[in-house]
């Protein structure tokens, strides 16, 4: 199988597997006072220090969660609730229109159930939020509870001007959250230097396990908990800590940040090869996203006249694993909200495929893709029927 879906999840690195297994053999609740508990606590705190050092944060700013979805929900809902509790007029959320569903749906839920007013930020044709649009959306900002714009987009790979956006948010005294889940280990990420108030990270996109992540939360940023219980993480997050997961996560964060430059150079060279060969194989393929300022492993195309999901299944049958941005609702593929926000029409937004490379990728996998792609595109075109109702 050619695995071209590293943005969905990437294989764990050996060091993280080994760290996980060694820690999983030990017993001890990190909140217990006895010796096994204290040893577990020490592993957690060393992991916290390691992640903080790798990502430019203080250890006390690292709040462990069950992954990216929880970190995003905690940031968006928790900061919204805390800021509105401090000043009732703060009911607005400023969010980019190309966020991952973990942010997008949390924002929409606050709109539907908590009376939040939402200002969606537009993006340009390559999926970039402009600082000017952000400044305009903030307005005088007195009514803004929280703003959120991702570091790099999971679908089209475009990297956002996070530091410029954070500077505007700081001037307006609005906490900015950034979902950096696709960015860590791919591009330089420094929490303190970026100026964001909160930042989400997850293990399984950078060589660690699924089900563990962190919200980096500035020490002075108030955040109301989502989960109530033992208050293990700064009273902001409750739940017995997953010591083995945390140790493996820290191992992967440290390794991915250390190797980031080398990884980016290798993977972007492979990506360039993939892009050139896809274009040569399918002349009318449209390359989406920022051609320059994008994640090193991301190549995203629309194939005119094809349904992305049909193409995905044809490639799967040929041994190629990739992804489409479109979600499925009631059996009907929905167009990608990211491409629609970038101004793509419905057909282009339904005809896209994402190929993402990572630390195990090889040129041989690109050979396999190129051998299968033209035939799959031909078949998908012949089978193409517009979605019902259009
Ligand atoms: C940008 C982004 N945010 C959030 C998530 C969710 O993270 P997790 O799978 O750890 O819940 C993902 C993973 O698909 C993602 O790519």
Image (spheres, rainbow, N blue to C red):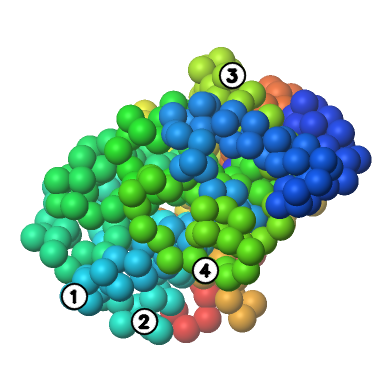
State which mark lies toward you, 3 or 2.
Answer: 2
Extreme residue in the left direction:
140
According to the picture, the residue beneath numbered tag 1 turns out to be 89
Q: Could you classify mark 1 by the number of other residues whose Cα lies within 10 Å: few (under 14), some (14-19), or many (20 or more)? A: few
Q: Residue furthest right?
A: 25
Q: For residue 259, which numbered disc appears in the image?
A: 3
Q: Nearer the viewer, residue 192 or 253?
A: 192
In three-dimensional space, the C-alpha distance between marks 1 and 3, rounded to whole angstroms, equals: 45 Å
Q: Vertically, is 370 above or below 116?
A: above
**Residue 293: image x %, image y %?**
36, 31
Cβ atoms under marks 1 and 3 closer than 8 Å? no
* Apparent side of residue 92 relative to residue 14 in the rendered image (left or right): left
Label 4: which residue?
226
Quadrant where the image shows the N terminus: top right
Badge nearest the viewer, 2 or 4: 4
Q: Is residue 357 visible in this depiction of the protein?
A: no
Q: Is residue 283 above or below residue 314?
A: above
Q: In x, y percent, where is residue 292?
A: 36, 29
Comparing marks 2 and 1, which lies closer to the viewer? Answer: 1
Which residue is nearer to you in this view: 190 or 84? 84
For disc 2, the marked residue is 114
Q: Under tag 3, what secondary structure?
A: loop
| Secondary structure at numbered mark 1 | loop
Rounded to the nearest angstrom, the CA distance separating label 3 from label 2 is 43 Å
Q: Mark 2: give few (<14), some (14-19) or many (20+) Cα within 10 Å.
A: some
Task: Kindly report the distance in space between the C-alpha atoms of the residues bearing marks 4 and 1.
Answer: 22 Å
Disc 3 to disc 4: CB gap under 8 Å? no
Which of the two discs, 1 and 3, sits closer to the camera? 1
Q: Secondary structure at mark 4?
A: loop
């Amino acid at each position: 199988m050619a695995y071209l879906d590293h943005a969905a999840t990437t294989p764990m690195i050996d060091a993280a597997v080994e760290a996980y297994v060694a820690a999983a053999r030990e017993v001890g609740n990190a909140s217990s006072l006895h010796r096994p508990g204290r040893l577990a606590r020490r592993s957690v705190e060393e992991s916290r220090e390691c992640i903080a050092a790798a990502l430019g944060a203080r250890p006390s700013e690292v709040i462990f969660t069950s992954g990216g979805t929880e970190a995003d929900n905690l940031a968006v809902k928790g900061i919204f609730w805390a800021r509105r509790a401090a000043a009732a007029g703060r009911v607005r959320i400023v969010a980019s229109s190309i966020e991952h569903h973990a942010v997008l749906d949390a924002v929409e839920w606050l709109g539907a159930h908590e009376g939040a007013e939402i200002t969606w930020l537009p993006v340009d044709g390559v999926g970039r939020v402009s600082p000017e649009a952000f400044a305009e959306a903030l307005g005088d900002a007195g009514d803004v509870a929280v703003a959120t714009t991702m570091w790099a987009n999971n679908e089209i790979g475009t990297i956002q001007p996070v530091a410029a956006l954070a500077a505007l948010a700081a001037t307006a005294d609005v906490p900015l959250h950034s979902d950096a889940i696709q960015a860590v280990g791919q591009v330089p990420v420094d929490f303190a230097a970026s100026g964001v108030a909160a930042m989400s990270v997850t293990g399984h996109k950078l060589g660690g396990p699924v089900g563990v992540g962190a919200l980096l939360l500035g020490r002075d940023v108030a955040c109301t908990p989502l989960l109530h219980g033992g208050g293990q993480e700064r009273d902001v997050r409750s739940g017995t800590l997953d010591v083995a997961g945390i140790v493996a996560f820290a191992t992967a964060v440290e390794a991915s940040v250390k190797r980031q430059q080398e990884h980016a150079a290798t993977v972007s060279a492979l990506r360039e090869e993939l892009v050139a060969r896809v274009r040569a194989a399918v002349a009318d393929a449209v390359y989406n996203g920022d051609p320059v300022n994008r994640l090193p492993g991301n190549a995203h195309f629309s194939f005119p006249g094809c349904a992305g999901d049909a193409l995905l299944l044809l490639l799967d049958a040929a041994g190629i694993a990739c992804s489409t941005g479109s979600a499925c609702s009631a059996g009907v593929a929905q167009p990608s909200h990211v491409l629609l926000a970038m101004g793509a029409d419905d057909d282009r937004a339904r005809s896209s495929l994402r190929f993402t490379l990572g630390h195990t990728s090889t040129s041989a996998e690109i050979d396999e893709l190129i051998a299968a792609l033209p035939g799959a595109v031909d078949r998908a075109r012949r089978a193409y029927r517009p979605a019902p109702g259009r």
